[in-house]
Amino acid sequence: MRLLISFLVGGLFGLGLMVSGMTDTTKVQGWLDVFGAWDPTLAFVMGGAILPMLAAWQLTRRRRSAVLGTPFPPKSTLGIDRQILLGSILFGAGWALVGLCPGPAIASLSYGGTEGLAFLIAMATGMLLLRLWQRCAQ
Amino acid sequence: MIFAALPTDWLYGLLGGLMIGTAGSVLLLVNGRIMGISGIFGDMIDGSSRSKLAENAALVAGLIVFPALFAATGAAPATLITGDWLLIVIGGLLVGFGTRMANGCTSGHGVCGISRMSPRGIVATLIYLTAGGVTMLLARHVLTVI
């Protein structure tokens, strides 16, 4: 059951990305291009996505655990540390260069051709490099 | 276009956004998980959360299969990705490295974090939006590489 829900959630997320236009990298780059031909679509996507989530977080307060028994995820104990600041700067920079964040990057496997696949491989490599770097730094 | 009935981009954006938020709500309320794609995909490939491996893989599979079916209908919106390989490699490395370092991306920190009023989610989102805007300004209007 958990697997089926995960599969369908991934599917609905992917379809939402396509319908919203967020799989079109020119729209994402247009949102970040405040000093050029600014495209406000992403704000509507974010707003539309946050609305149901606001209700969902409210519902979690009335229940002890999720429907399938898992406790709700606790808030992170980490504060605003250097990792989140530097990591978000690097992510934002990469996001602007191509117009893909992790969700659309994975979805792009199905339609993004060789370029989408190459981006996904580079992204996966970046993720593994971060772990490697953390292990070396310890 | 099956969406021709909707006249403007922002309506598609709102509709797609509601779908994304509904997906995140279902995952939270039914499975008790945060729909953060960088975490789900990252944990899957670096093996850092073996107990969730099957769930993570199922979500990633859905995220590939459903858009593929939609794309196969020929009705899906246009998807354009740059053909500049240097940008693709640098951009991909930065997005992967950065989201794992920050423990989240647009879905986890943005959609799930902001709606939870999480200070980390809000701060991360403000920073990656600003960094993205500055990078765009430099790369497009100063260096004119994109």
Image (cartoon, rainbow, N blue to C red):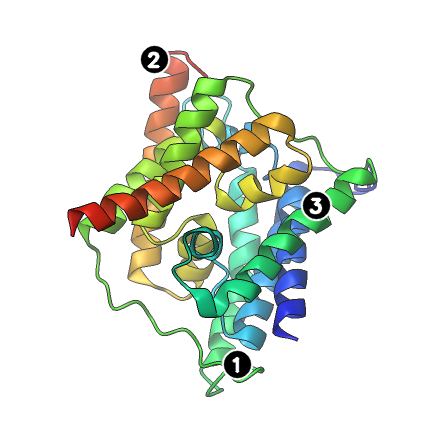
Which residue is more in the foreground, A118 or B129? Answer: A118
Position of B40 with respect to A16 (left or right) is: left
Whether residue B108 is visible here, answered yes or no, is: yes
**Amino acid on which disc 2 is placed:** Val
Give the residue at mark 2: B142
Give the residue at mark 3: B67
Residue B81 location in percent, x, y? 58, 26
Which residue is more in the foreground, B137 or A2? Answer: A2
Of the residues tagged 2 and 1, which is closer to the observer? 1
- Residue at (42, 29) in percent of width and height: B91
Badge 1: few (under 14), some or many (20 or more) residues near its Cα, within 10 Å?
many
Badge 2: few (under 14), some or many (20 or more) residues near its Cα, within 10 Å?
few
Q: Chain under label 2?
A: B
**Amino acid on which disc 1 is placed:** Ala
Q: Are marks 2 and 1 in contact (CB under 8 Å)?
A: no
- Residue at (55, 21) in percent of width and height: B82
**Quarter-of-image position of residue A127:** top left
Residue B143, above or below A58? above
